[in-house]
Amino acid sequence: TVLTSLGRPALQLTDVPMGTVRVQTLMATGSTTQGVDLDNVGGAVAIATGTITNPTADGVRIQNSAATVDLGMLRILNGMARGIALVSNSGTLTYGGMIEGMGTEGIEAAMTSGNITLSGVIVKDYGMTDNMVAGVFINNPQGGTIAIEGKSQVTTQTSTLNCVAVER
């Protein structure tokens, strides 16, 4: 399956309690919101590869969800907000792609209890509009594990930015 969008999310799911969504390639350009938006989703969502470019909000937003989400090798480029935003989730996230040129955090997990695995992920050139952020920001964790493994890289171009930050 190939999903392509211009000016809108390529994948938007709301109030989907179960099921499986598999996407081979996802391309979202210039979304006026997120490139991928999952709200109150269960089941499983898998995106093998693709690119989200220039979203005006988060590249990927997953909130209030118990889904098992695998974002594969998805690239998220030049967004105004966060590359990946996880808010109040109990599901799991696996990600191994690249996030570059985001306005704020590369990845933020807020009030999330599910497991997060970042394997071979690259996060760079974040904080373009806010110089007090982190490449990976864990905000008020509610449980679960967070693993940054493999050949993952989180790099910053300025001394005012944190690569990884955890705040309770």
Image: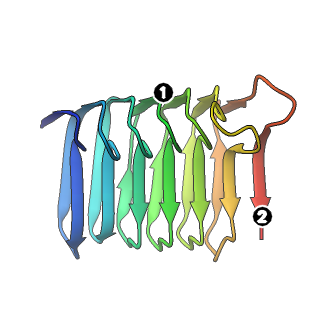
Image quadrant containing the N terminus: top left
Write the residue at 64% across / 26% down.
125
Instruction: State the image coordinates of residue 8 (x, y, percent, origin top left).
Output: 22, 41
Q: CA distance from mark 2 to mark 1?
A: 25 Å
Q: Is residue 20 left or right of residue 57?
A: left
Q: Residue lying farthest left?
A: 1
Determine which residue is flagged by label 2.
Answer: 167
Front residue (pair 55, 138): 55
The mark nearer the N terminus, 2 or 1, is 1
Residue type (three-letter) at the residue carrying disc 2: Glu
Determine which residue is flagged by label 1.
Answer: 78
Front residue (pair 8, 121): 8
Q: Is residue 7 left or right of residue 59?
A: left
Tell me which colouring the rendered structure shows: rainbow
Instruction: State the image coordinates of residue 42 (x, y, percent, origin top left).
Output: 29, 71
For numbered disc 1, what is the local secondary structure? loop
Write the residue at 29% across / 42% down.
47
